[in-house]
Image: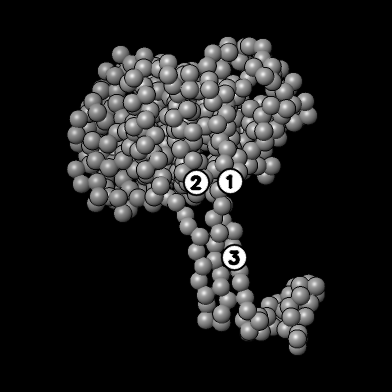
Amino acid sequence: MINILRLDSKNSDFAKQLDDLLCREADTGDDVQGLVAGILADVKTRGNTALCDYTERFDGWACTGESIEITRERMQEAWNAVSDMDRESLTLAANRIREYHMHQQQDDWEYTDDIGMTLGQKVTPLDRVGLYVPGGKAAYPSSVLMNAVPAEVAGVKEVIMVVPTPNGEINELVLAAAYVSGVQRGFAVGGAQAVAALAYGTETIPAVDKIVGPGNKYVAAAKRQVFGTCGIDMIAGPSEIVVVADGGNPAWIAADFLSQAEHDEAAQSILISTDKHLLAQVADSIEAHLSVLPRADIARASVETHGALIHVQNWDEAADVVNIIAPEHLELALENPDAMLPAIRHAGAIFIGHYVPEALGDYIAGPNHVLPTNRTARFSSPLGVYDFQKRSSVIRATRDAVQKIGPAAAHLAHREGLQAHALTLELRLNDKS
């Protein structure tokens, strides 16, 4: 039988047990940071030569600056080569993602206040964005859609993609997803070296304004280190899910519980319920699913290392535990989920009711599946159109408006010891022309 940690909120040390459960290693210690720093500096200095050296070392194939490029025409070839069902599914997903993100569009605005100053905001899309598509243990065409489509909706001029290619093999479905979502150029490189190429540019890969998309611990460390040279979306950690259930089909709940565990051994799955009998039933169903799932070894390691079944005394307590966890994915598998929803303050994506598994959001529902992990949902949001735009403030003022508020601004400038600041105002305040 699978060995899953069981916690009970009535235990005196529950708070400490929960804290210990959530303290997963970020795995970006000094050894990782040091290795990544060296890779970044090397690619920044030697460009394509370093990039291809690392690609041969880590991905197992010898490349050149020319051979790493994936053209728009190559993406179209992949689109034509995949099955009809592949194309139909990718098109449906892209259209739904596009429709959802259209609702996130931001507009310019202005208002005129009571002294005659006109103040506002100007929204501008980024010029060039780099999309990191994870690879290795699995290929993720859905990640291409979730990153590229919002960028397109935001009006980004150029979206380029990097994707790891172990042994030089390129996943055709990933390229098809890039084609349907409007990616202009791709490059068959991954890891920290690909992040370096996007941040600094090489002879082949242009430098970007922002890097988006999840990756392994080396990618996460690289994104952290290049922030400032360019923007990043977030530092993504291992995937996670919390399911809150009051009944329903234990087999469904168990499958939902395992949906993130199969990503990798560091993922985390947690089930919360007031019903101990349900928790036991779900544990049995988890074991049954693991007997047939192809990625059972990965999922089992995840569940036994990081998973938990949590018994709470009431639903208010359940909401409190959810807010402490601040999960990436939250399923409210409840008969009346809307009763709990107002109490949920911290979650990346919330799936409402028994018929909305997390996987629906991963692929086809429309909202973004690039979500804050490792409790960062306390202060972060899902990837969206707003991540591909920037805002400039706009200030207009008449002579009369400056006369009304300029003296106070000049006074504050003097108080800060910035006399040139004050002078710019006083010259205008004393102008008699």
From the top left corner, tell me how far across and down residue 240 is, in percent: 42, 34
The residue identified by callout 2 is: 154
Q: Residues within 10 Å of mark 2 (few under 14, many from 20)?
A: many
Q: Is residue 367 left or right of residue 333?
A: right
The residue identified by callout 3 is: 394
Label pair 2/1, CB-CB below 8 angstroms: yes
First in sequence: mark 3 or mark 2?
Answer: 2
The residue identified by callout 1 is: 126
Which of 205/310 is in front? 205
Q: Is residue 351 left or right of residue 155?
A: left
From the top left corner, tell me how far across and down residue 46 is, in percent: 77, 25
Which of 66/417 is in front? 66
Q: Residues within 10 Å of mark 1 (few under 14, many from 20)?
A: many
Query: Residue placed at 52% from the left, 75% from the top?
Result: 112
The CA span between labels 1 and 3 is: 18 Å
First in sequence: mark 2 or mark 1?
Answer: 1
Asked whether residue 200 is in view, the answer is yes
Q: Is residue 292 above or below residue 222?
A: above
Q: Is residue 350 above or below residue 256?
A: below
Which of 151/23 is in front? 151
Query: Quadrant location of residue 397?
Result: bottom right
User: Dot 3 lies on which element?
Assistant: strand
Q: Split into 4 quadrants, where in the image is the N terminus?
A: top left
